[in-house]
Image: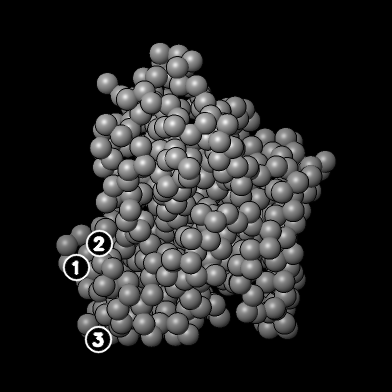
């Protein structure tokens, strides 16, 4: 039976004030959201006109999106954060694909050691994959088409070289489809002697050292991969975005707006180009981001202080750590503890000891059966069933969840008490807090803290999406204008948007506040399944066509 202690000796007023104050720090009203989105738009413009801005707005040299008719078989290598994946992707040309993949772990030592060791490991993984799994590579594209993704004749590829597309999900200043210098590491990577070097060359050198007949022909960010793969499977896409370990977005921009390309041939050619925003670095100066002491602690103790500010408010790598800081402050609250009888655990005292997945479990325990799962919007073209495209949702109804902390556990219904009991078990098991120190009220507070942090992340994510819709003239900030297009397709990937309860609904709510209901209803947020693999394959196809 859970202990029922309520306020641990603090007067209710004091406890309430402390919790109210935290809640206030994490709240964002409409004016805040508008201010943040306006700053986003300014930073987009700056990054498009000059190099060396934190919001890097990287031209990708991908000059169109696929239409689903592309064919061919390619290797893809995906280095993104949590895992390294090698895939063989067969594009079938009917908006479908077959993908076979193998995941490999990237150890902390590899992430922070010498870059050549990391790239040798990538080459070894490709070698292992080719030996064990791959079947039909090299590529065998067929029909010729009129878009940049049209299948090439591969006669000029030095046979039997296998063309490979690299998805490299870190900031890289691209100078061509197959060239780009590493700008900085993110997400806990810090391999030495990579910054400033061409990532394709680093990989190709590793292949050559191992005498592998593999040629890296294209370099792509995971957001670009999400955009391309969603376009391939669902017929068009304006934004590819990732809400996972890290966060970022890539969208299709008019080349004339990419002023920093000067009078280069790419700019003279005009048309459209995919731009990788690197929005994780938005507002590194934190002039508009709603920074709390809990965020400052995360940043100060991170591997990259003062960088990737936006990402540190949004992404799966950091949300658990922010929440851990909030919980520790309640354990240590004065004059009396407000959580767990003032006791912590080894787990909770460890840097990054609270995984965002635990927040997700806590919120799920609370939400299941309480808020309706946001349904799929049937007004937009139906997506194909798995494996190619699964709609995350396109709903217009956003549930109204309760985000306030609880002051009176005794007044809750028996269903809610059962939910709190489930959360209590998660806390005991996953945070290793002694059962005798976890009351139902503690469970409620952990749920409350998780939802504050996640809700803020989702709302800020909505600002990023809204900024792209305004930048591409599909919406006006504040609402009042909607494009004629019946559907605005956005491809997404990442653990938060896929698995965190209500992240998507909360993002949509923010979007609705920013651009109005008319636009929000048209937004079709769809999962870019296997975006990194399929996107890299599509880029490899475009590159081989260009003779790389
Ligand atoms: C990287 C981006 C990447 C994003 C999502 C960020 O940390 O800078 O390049 O797209 O994570 O993986």
Residue, disc 2: 104
Q: Nearer the viewer, mark 3 or mark 2?
A: 2
**Mark 3 CB near ligand 1 (8 Å cut):** no
Task: Provide residue 444's location: percent of width, then percent of height.
Answer: 44, 30
Mark 3 in CB contact with mark 2 (< 8 angstroms): no
Residue, disc 3: 209
**Mark 2 CB near ligand 1 (8 Å cut):** no
User: On screen, 506 above or below 397?
Assistant: below
Front one among 446 and 32: 446
Front one among 525 and 283: 283
- Answer yes or no: is residue 251 visible: yes
User: On screen, 539 above or below 318?
Assistant: below
* Marks 3 and 2, the one that precedes in the sequence: 2
* Marks 2 and 1, the one that precedes in the sequence: 2
Q: Quadrant of the N terminus?
A: top left
* Residue at x 27%, y 31% (from the top left corner): 436
Front one among 26 and 479: 26
* Residue at x 54%, y 56% (from the top left corner): 293
Find the distance from the CA under tag 3 to the CA under tag 2: 20 Å
Q: Please tell me how crowded label 1 is: few (under 14), some (14-19), or many (20+) other residues with Cα within 10 Å.
A: some
């Amino acid at each position: 039976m859970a202990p029922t202690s309520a306020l641990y000796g603090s007067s209710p007023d004091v406890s309430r004030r402390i919790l109210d104050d935290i809640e206030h720090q994490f709240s964002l009203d409409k004016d805040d959201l508008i201010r943040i989105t306006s700053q986003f738009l300014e930073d987009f413009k700056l990054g498009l006109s000059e190099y060396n801005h934190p919001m890097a707005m990287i031209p990708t040299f991908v000059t169109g999106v696929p239409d689903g008719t592309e064919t061919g078989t390619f290797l893809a290598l995906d280095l993104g954060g949590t895992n390294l994946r090698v895939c063989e992707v067969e594009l079938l040309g009917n908006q479908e694909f077959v993908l076979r993949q193998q995941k490999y772990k990237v150890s902390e030592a590899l992430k922070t050691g010498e870059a050549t060791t990391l790239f040798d490991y990538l080459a070894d993984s490709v070698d292992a994959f080719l030996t064990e799994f791959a079947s039909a590579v090299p590529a065998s594209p067929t029909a010729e088409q009129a878009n940049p993704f049209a299948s090439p004749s591969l006669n000029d590829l030095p046979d039997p070289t296998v063309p490979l597309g690299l998805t490299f999900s870190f900031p890289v200043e691209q100078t061509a489809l197959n060239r780009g210098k590493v700008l900085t590491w993110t997400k806990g990577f810090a391999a030495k002697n990579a910054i400033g070097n061409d990532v394709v060359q680093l990989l190709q050198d590793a292949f050559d050292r191992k005498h592998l007949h593999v040629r890296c022909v294209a370099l792509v960010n995971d957001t670009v991969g999400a955009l391309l793969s969603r376009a391939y499977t669902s017929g068009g896409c304006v934004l590819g975005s990732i809400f996972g370990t890290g966060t970022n977005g890539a969208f299709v921009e008019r080349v004339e707006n990419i002023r920093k390309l000067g009078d280069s041939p790419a700019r003279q050619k005009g048309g459209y180009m995919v731009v990788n925003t690197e929005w994780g670095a938005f507002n590194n100066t934190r002039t508009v981001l709603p920074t709390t002491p809990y965020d400052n602690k995360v940043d100060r103790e991170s591997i990259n202080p003062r960088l990737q500010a936006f990402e540190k408010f949004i992404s799966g790598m950091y949300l658990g750590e922010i929440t851990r800081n909030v919980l520790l402050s309640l354990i240590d609250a004065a004059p009396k503890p407000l959580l767990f009888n003032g006791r912590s655990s080894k787990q909770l005292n460890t840097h990054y000891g609270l995984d965002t997945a635990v927040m997700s479990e806590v919120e799920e325990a609370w939400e299941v059966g309480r808020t309706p799962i946001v349904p799929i919007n049937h007004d937009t073209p139906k997506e194909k069933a798995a494996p190619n495209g699964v709609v995350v949702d396109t709903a217009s109804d956003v549930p109204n969840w309760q985000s306030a902390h609880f002051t009176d556990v005794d007044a809750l219904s028996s269903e809610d008490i059962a939910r709190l009991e489930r959360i209590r078990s998660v806390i005991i098991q996953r945070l290793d807090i002694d059962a005798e120190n976890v009351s139902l009220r503690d469970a409620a507070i952990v749920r409350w803290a998780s939802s504050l942090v996640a809700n803020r992340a989702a709302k800020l994510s909505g600002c990023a999406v809204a900024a792209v819709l305004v930048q591409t003239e599909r919406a006006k900030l504040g609402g009042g204008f909607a494009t004629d297009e019946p559907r605005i397709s956005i491809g997404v990937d990442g653990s938060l948007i896929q698995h965190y309860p209500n992240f998507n609904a909360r993002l949509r709510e923010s979007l609705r506040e920013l651009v109005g209901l008319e636009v929000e209803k048209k937004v079709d947020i769809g999962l870019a399944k296997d975006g990194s693999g399929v996107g890299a394959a599509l880029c490899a196809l475009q590159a081989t066509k260009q003779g790389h």
